[in-house]
Image: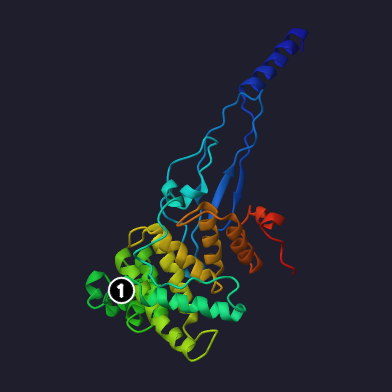
Amino acid sequence: MTLKDLLKKQQKIKDNATESSAAEFTFMRSDTNTQELIEPPSYPDDQTPRPHKDHRSISEHFSRFRSSSNASVDSTTSSRGEKRLSHRLHLRSHSRTSSSSSVNLPTDLPAISDDAGDREEREAQWENRATILAKENPIARQSLAGSDSDGRPPISRGISDAQDLERSTALFGRLAETNAMAQILYGLALRHGWGIPPNAPLAITYLSQAASNAAAVESAALSSGMKKGGAAKGELVLAIYELANSYRHGWGVEKDPVAARSYYETAANLGDTDAMNEVARCYEEGFGGKKDKFVAARYYRLAEEQGNKTFGNSWIWKDKYGPKSAP
């Protein structure tokens, strides 16, 4: 090969290198509910524009048939191309200064302080609060009579013709006439269209009825001196949590940030780790009341200590927000 050919080959290599674009890397932080695209830092001499990217929900909470993070996502982004957590949670700036009252909360709902007796006594007080929320929920007073006309499939058709999901939903629909857990599961099926056409207003009616029925059992247990509650405590806590999701997202009812936060906090103090993370976000973002990062950190820590960790929350262990609990 002549010198001229070598020079041409070298120039061709340089041209190809100039035309080819540099490899791109995507940095991502995710948990079981969301993923967050992280932009690397830019430098003054870096003139390459970086596209704005949105956060997207990547999965639903299927644990215990839950779905709390799959509502539509607001399209507003910040100047750094990141979607604020408040937009992912359907928060608005006015929520931080909104009224602390709600038509969906009883006016005589008891406030519970952290120093109200020992842990068992406080839990009993929170469960009593849950029973009041459930029994005085205005939606729970609606009758389920005639709900077959609202889309519940007859059990005979569900068994003979439909697939497994439709058969299961039909069975839950029949059991929901008397059973609180079946009411919860059937309400969730109606809310999300699992084996039945979605019907959000009817869904929240079933969830409210489930909470009310479970509350009746638990109220009797508390009245008899059982501080840890009775046989329907699990159903009560789950129903309270799912009602919080309904108020937060506006599923079958008008959005009510104040009620959502109160319901989340009640379920959180009865041991629900998903509710702990949700109410922590409410306090962190000022959703449904005043912002309070100290309370947010406390609930995040409680959830993490019980195995429900939210990635990217190392700030909650800073000394200013409270020391880490001993193992």
- Is 104 in front, or is 13? 104
Which residue is found at the position 34% from the left and 68% from the top?
203
The answer to whether residue 81 shows anywhere in this view is yes
Specify the quadrant of the image occupied by residue 12: top right
Residue type beneath disc 1 = Asp
The answer to whether residue 195 shows anywhere in this view is no
Q: Is residue 164 left or right of residue 79?
A: left
Horizontal and vertical percent position of residue 178: 35, 84
Compared to 70, does 181 lie above or below?
below
Which residue is found at the position 40% from the left and 58% from the top?
249
Q: Is residue 276 left or right of residue 44?
A: left
Report the number of discs: 1
Horizontal and vertical percent position of residue 134: 39, 75
Specify the quadrant of the image occupied by residue 154: bottom left
Q: SS class of the residue under badge 1?
A: loop
Compared to 125, does 242 lie above or below?
above
Image quarter (top left, top right, bottom left or bottom right) of the N terminus: top right
Horizontal and vertical percent position of residue 139: 31, 71
Q: Mark 1 points at which residue?
A: 161
Name the outermost residue toward the top. 4
Q: Name the image colouring.
A: rainbow
- Is 235 in front, or is 174? 235
